[in-house]
Amino acid sequence: MRVVRTPAEVRAALAGVSRPLGLVPTMGALHAGHLALIRRARAESATVAASVFVNPLQFGPNEDFERYPRAFDDDLTQLREAGVELVYAPHVATMYPPDFATAVDPGPVGERYEGALRPGHFRGVATVCTKLFATVTPDRAYFGAKDAQQVAVLRRIVADLDLGIELIVVPTVREPDGLALSSRNAYLDADQRAAAPALHRALDAIVAAVRSGERDAQRAVERGRAELRSPLREAYLDVVDPRTFAPAPEIRAPALAIGSAWIGTTRLIDNEPIEATA
Amino acid sequence: MRVVRTPAEVRAALAGVSRPLGLVPTMGALHAGHLALIRRARAESATVAASVFVNPLQFGPNEDFERYPRAFDDDLTQLREAGVELVYAPHVATMYPPDFATAVDPGPVGERYEGALRPGHFRGVATVCTKLFATVTPDRAYFGAKDAQQVAVLRRIVADLDLGIELIVVPTVREPDGLALSSRNAYLDADQRAAAPALHRALDAIVAAVRSGERDAQRAVERGRAELRSPLREAYLDVVDPRTFAPAPEIRAPALAIGSAWIGTTRLIDNEPIEATA
């Protein structure tokens, strides 16, 4: 496994490698969710590359960029054991030199929910992924279903910018009690951790309400909201079109239950798909 | 020479072609300025592709998108005779389907001068070129020096998005009386055409003022302004940093004299480099 730091080194390392080439972009602090992405990439790619980069562009000024978990040596051990051939781990100054000015803006799909709570977040995600895709030129890129709005944003820019990359979305990996794996779970103390699965129960309650015949999104969401008790504080809970992230007031087509809750100073997100209804 | 209409057709046509691959993006209505780009690309590329696409994103609502000159059959004849292997001529609906939403924003370099007169213009240029570059994946792309701010914008996005493409800037081709070739020159009537070279004379006067020792940009610009007489009406005339397109009040480094003037309902642009001064 090679570890490189610049676009030129990536291009030199990947010149002539066997394809298909799979890319797993990460911010490091790897957990079993990331390893599921790498396993899937490994299974269907001749060459697997991963990136490790905590992207300052996608953090707001009052967010957790500085304290975001970093575990680079442990990440490299996991990536090596998972069979990754190339790790791209650029420095911030390489990705964003002082005169850096370009932004990739995905438009309305990035404006609600996470986009509203984190102004500029999806512009940062779209910009860094455009850079990573241009540098690595993968055939396929792998993302977790947990970050569903990120997936919708990236589908939008890949289609709109003719990037010619297939996005592969891998199901969310969960703890036995239903909590979605996230690097931010490390911020939770024992009591917060014990309470955290309520977010997933809220989403399950929305799905169950739809399954039992509820077609009005707000009534279904109320059923979920009943699960969100202290110490969780709702940031949002809704049913959306998974492609546009527009609210779906009447649940008629395949839809997505999405939710976010604060526990202390940590905000968790999760989602559950709602099957097509007759 | 093959003519194709979709990104998938471009990728299929270019799979395995000899490199380096040169791309000459155009809006059609080809003239000797475009042919100079193609000659340069032909001289240093194993394969030459050209695009012909009048990009609605880079025209404002009150601009000349509808009346912009179109001469596709004649363009194809010229491209074939110039030795182009592949022409990518997408339909507007292919480039911008109804749910298209992504924008590539180059930041401050695109905000003054043409960017101020044409809000959204350089976002449109940056977006379409990102698409063309992602589709064709050229090693080098060729642009005319006449559109100097466009060149600065494209240098910005190629660097910022790690596109790994070399931009080659080809000197402006001029009529014997100094008028820069432009597809928009076709809009001029005989009297307007006779007056049009005054724009280039104004830029030459700025360069001459600097050459004779003037270091104050505004005094140099005044010397140029004296050349802009009716029927020309100044849109802007200035001295800028050619990389950032920021005004250069004191002329100390390599700089660029830029100008634009209206003649009737047509607006022409031009520029002249100012050599490094001691």
Image (cartoon, coloured by chain):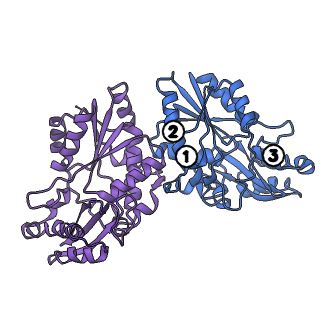
Chain colours: A blue, B purple
- Report which quarter residue A207 is drawn in: top right
What residue type is disc 3 on? Asn
Quadrant of image for the N terminus of chain A: top right
- The x and y percentages for residue B268 are 22, 65
Task: Output the chain of dot 2.
Answer: A
The amino acid beneath tag 2 is Pro
Dot 3: what SS?
helix
Q: Position of residue A82 (x, y in %)?
A: 70, 25
The span from disc 1 to disc 3 (Cα, nearest Å) is: 29 Å
Label 1 lies in what chain? A
Earlier along the polypeptide chain: callout 1 or callout 3?
1
Which residue is tagged 1? A94
What residue lies at 52% left-to-right and 28% top-to-bottom? A13
Query: Which badge, 2 or 1, is on the more N-terminal residue?
Result: 2
Which mark is on residue A7? 2
Query: Marks 3 and 2: CB-CB under 8 Å?
Result: no
Q: Position of residue B35 (x, y in %)?
A: 18, 44
Of B162 and A193, the residue lying toward us: B162
Residue A198 visible in image: yes
Task: Classify residue A235 as left or right of residue B28.
Answer: right
Label 3 resides on the chain identified as A
Exactly how many numbered labels are in the figure? 3
| Residue visible at 68% across and 46% down in the picture | A256
Question: Is residue B5 shown above or below B215?
Answer: above
The answer to whether A221 is drawn above or below residue A135 in the figure is below
- Res. A25 image quadrant: top right
For the residue carrying disc 3, how many other residues have a C-alpha within 10 Å: few (<14), some (14-19), or many (20+)? some
Q: On the image, numbered disc 3 is attached to which residue?
A: A185
User: Quadrant location of the C terminus of chain A?
Assistant: top right
